[in-house]
């Protein structure tokens, strides 16, 4: 019997959600049994194995007619797009990050399930699909949103074709998206000016708690993604070398957060940091240690830098820091179209003046220049120049 497990940090440090596949109901909908388990990952895996074996032995369950035969029975001329997405959800979504799975779920339920999702895959052609994309555009969806819908449909239909032993087509393959004029496209993310960033940092300096000022300073000085900064641990800070290592990212899902690997392989990197930013991180660590001592806890190397709980064993919820940034932006009198992610654009824009394109992309962790790693050291002289330049801009 197929099963899966996933961490549930929102229910405790050692909480796991165990799910056992029960087959499909009369309507073809996937049925699962879910249970919360507390203990180590190995213990959770043993419990999942036990639950799966228990289900296999249940009356009416034939061991050899589980997932493969059930799926084989479903793949045919009557298979709908919704059938393909539900099967993918039961056999593949556990490998996705929680935030990606949540977004897929939203796209499916809002834009696909009650529309093209009801259509049989075998009855769809490129014309039907492109007409559907155009209807979405007319309904007001952005170019990026329609592109995301197409990506979900393409993956689901490609899997349906594979799982049906190529008896089903993939009607999404040769489709094209409608065009959006410049007036119809959403405005690009604006890079804030140096003056705006300095006003943000100045307003943050009035905060008695050094967490938010250090967080905003670090993002402005390095261009880190929000999730990367939230997953930063004290072991990742090289105090003597004025550098940090980025090898984890925090992702959100309904009801909690999880620490995962970085967004792409190229996102794992080491980057230089200017002296004043390191000093601000050092002040934050002193503050975190004081809080931990008062609570009878301890700050270790694996503690999260921007944690709110004493001891830093629980990572900060990213949206909490985003809300804090919004309040800071209002106090600083900075325009509302400047967001946390705008600081990454600020970094990219300003670095054009001092370092090469390949080094800038390596510093920001863009996968399109992964091969640059072979020619650029983790903290090269050029990257050090980038760090010092950003430090001079921020004051």
Image (tube, rainbow, N blue to C red):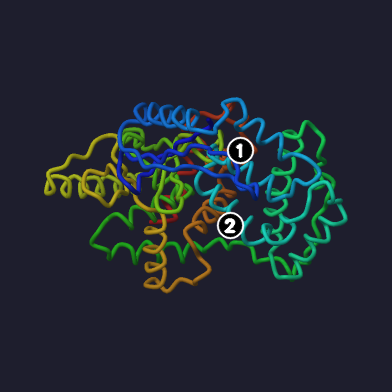
Instruction: Name the residue: 58% across, 53% down.
Output: 105
In the rendered structure, the answer to whether residue 128 lies left or right of residue 262 reads: right
Image quarter in which the C terminus is found:
bottom left
Of the numbered discs 2 and 1, the one sitting upstream in the chain is 2
**Residue nearest the viewer, comparing 180 with 67:** 67
User: As displayed, is residue 115 above or below residue 365?
Assistant: below
Q: Secondary structure at mark 1?
A: helix
Q: Secondary structure at mark 2?
A: helix
In the rendered structure, the answer to whether residue 331 lies left or right of residue 188 reads: left
Q: CA distance from mark 2 to mark 1?
A: 26 Å
The reply to whether residue 272 is visible in this rendering is no
Circle 2 crowding by C-alpha within 10 Å: few under 14, some 14–19, many from 20 = few
Circle 1 crowding by C-alpha within 10 Å: few under 14, some 14–19, many from 20 = some
**Residue nearest the viewer, comparing 386 with 244:** 244
The reply to whether residue 242 is visible in this rendering is yes
Mark 2 and mark 1 residues within 8 Å of each other at the beta carbon:
no
Q: Position of residue 361 (x, y in %)?
A: 59, 41
User: Where does label 1 land, which residue?
Assistant: 367
Depth-wise, is mark 2 or mark 1 nearer the camera?
A: 2
In the rendered structure, the answer to whether residue 240 lies left or right of residue 263 reads: left
Instruction: Name the residue: 46% across, 50% down.
Output: 253
* Quarter assignment of residue 13: top left
Instruction: Name the residue: 42% across, 67% down.
Output: 326
* Residue 106, disc: 2
Q: Position of residue 192 (x, y in %)?
A: 52, 63
Q: Position of residue 117 (x, y in %)?
A: 71, 55
């Amino acid at each position: 019997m197929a099963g899966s497990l996933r961490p549930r940090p929102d229910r405790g440090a050692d909480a796991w959600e165990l799910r056992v596949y029960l087959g499909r109901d009369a309507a073809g909908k996937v049925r699962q049994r879910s249970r919360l388990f507390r203990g180590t990952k190995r213990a959770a895996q043993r419990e999942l194995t036990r639950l799966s074996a228990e289900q296999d032995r249940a009356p009416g369950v034939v061991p050899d007619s589980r997932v493969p035969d059930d799926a084989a029975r479903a793949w045919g001329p009557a298979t709908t797009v919704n059938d393909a997405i539900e099967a993918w959800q039961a056999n593949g979504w556990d490998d996705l990050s929680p935030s990606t799975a949540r977004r897929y779920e939203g796209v499916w339920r809002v834009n696909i399930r009650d529309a093209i999702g009801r259509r049989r895959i075998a009855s769809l052609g490129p014309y039907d699909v492109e007409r559907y994309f155009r209807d979405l555009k007319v309904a007001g969806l952005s170019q990026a949103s329609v592109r995301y819908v197409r990506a979900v449909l393409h993956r689901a239909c490609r899997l349906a074709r594979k799982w049906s032993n190529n008896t089903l087509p993939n009607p999404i393959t040769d489709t094209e998206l409608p065009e959006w004029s410049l007036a119809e496209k959403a405005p690009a993310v604006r890079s804030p000016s140096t003056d705006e960033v300095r006003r943000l940092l100045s307003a943050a300096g009035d905060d008695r708690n050094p967490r938010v000022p250090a967080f905003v300073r670090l993002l402005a000085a390095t261009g880190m993604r929000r999730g990367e900064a939230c997953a930063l641990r004290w072991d990742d800070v090289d105090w003597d070398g004025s550098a940090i290592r980025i090898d984890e990212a925090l992702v959100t899902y309904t009801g909690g957060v999880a620490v995962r690997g970085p967004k792409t392989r190229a996102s794992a990197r080491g980057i230089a940091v200017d002296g004043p930013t390191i000093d601000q991180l050092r002040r934050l660590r002193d503050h975190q240690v004081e809080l931990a001592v008062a609570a009878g806890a301890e700050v270790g190397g694996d503690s999260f830098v921007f944690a709110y709980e004493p001891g830093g064993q629980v990572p900060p919820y990213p949206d909490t820091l985003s809300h804090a940034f919004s309040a800071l932006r209002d106090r600083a009198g900075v325009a509302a179209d400047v967001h946390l992610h705008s600081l990454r654009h600020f970094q990219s824009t300003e670095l054009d003046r001092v370092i090469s394109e390949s080094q800038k992309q390596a510093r920001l962790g863009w996968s399109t220049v992964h091969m640059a790693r072979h020619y650029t050291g983790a903290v090269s002289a050029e990257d050090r120049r980038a760090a010092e330049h950003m430090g001079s801009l921020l004051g």
